[in-house]
Amino acid sequence: MLLEIEGLSKSFGSVVAADAIDLKLTHGETLGIIGPNGAGKTTLFNLITGGLVPDRGSIRLNDRDITAVSPHERCRHGIARAHQIPQPFGNLTVFENLLVAAVHGRQLSERDAAAPCADILVRTGLIARANTPVRTLTLLERKRLEMARALATGPHLLLLDEIAGGLTEAECRQLIGTIKDVHAAGTAIIWIEHIVHALLAVVGRLIVLDFGRKVAEGAPHQVMSSAEVRQIYIGIEA
């Protein structure tokens, strides 16, 4: 088992953002997470990456308890996150951005990091832009770079945080292709996304959160056809 979460809970005063969440993920699996705003999706990611400390529960990665491990150590153990709003090093080139991630995330020398970074640029469709300053990239290219930087840390698990946000329909289709290529190379993925059709094109299992609770889990199209999910997430009366 790659990731095992048991009874994970987090509250902010009277607001329960994570309510005894259980979650398991196998190596190479793709999992989607949906839910309305305020459902606890981002809190869950922050707990997994170490940005937040849980009130209760445990997180295990590759059978190692990482509940109290720092964010940078979790990165080195194999967790990486791509954010909705990319924040690359704007004065560096695309390739240099990946080198920084590989050197600090995987503790590689620049020489040893060069070949893996080039391979990642090929897989994410950015190799032709390798020597381009980041500030000149399009939004889609910046999204791809956000994923590429995460991959440069050598993760077993890639967390995608609403990465399709702001893209056109055509750009979204291209991004889906890139994510499929990343998964085909063996990386497990958990993807939070409001653009549900993009999510359904990639993930093999779907979880629905509402007010910090896991209210549904299973095959994506089966979950989406649930009356409870339609009422909670889509706003259609059951």
Image (cartoon, rainbow, N blue to C red):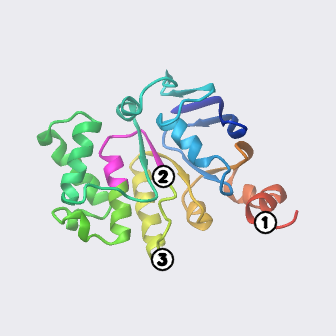
Rate crowding at label 1 as few (under 14), some (14 to 19) or many (20 or more) other CA atoms within 10 Å.
Answer: few
Pinpoint residue 169: horizontal percent, then vertical percent: 51, 77
Query: Residue visible at 58% across and 66% down?
Result: 195
The answer to which image quadrant residue 76 occupies is top left
The residue under label 3 is 168
The crowding category of the residue bearing disc 3, from other C-alpha atoms within 10 Å (few below 14, some 14 to 19, many at least 20), is few
Q: Is residue 60 magenta?
A: no
Distance from Cα at disc 3 to Cα at disc 1: 24 Å
Q: Secondary structure at mark 1?
A: loop
Which residue matches tag 1?
Answer: 235
Q: Which mark is residue 160?
A: 2
N-term mark: 3 or 1: 3
Which label sits in the foreground, 2 or 1?
Answer: 1
Viewer-side residue, 53 vs 75: 53
| The residue stretch that appears in magenta | 147-160
Relative to 236, say whether 51 is above or below: above
Disc with the residue nearer the chain's start (2 vs 1): 2
Which comes before the other along the chain, label 3 or label 2? 2
In the image, taking residue 16 as reference, residue 65 lies left or right, namely left
Location of residue 223 (image quadrant)? bottom right
Residue 74: image x %, image y %?
Answer: 41, 31
Disc 2, SS: strand
Instruction: Identify the residue shown where x is 81% and y is 61%.
Output: 231
Q: Decide: marks 3, 1 in contact (CB < 8 A)?
A: no
**Crowd tier of the residue under label 2, counting other residues whose Cα lies within 10 Å: few below 14, some 14–19, many 20 or above:** many
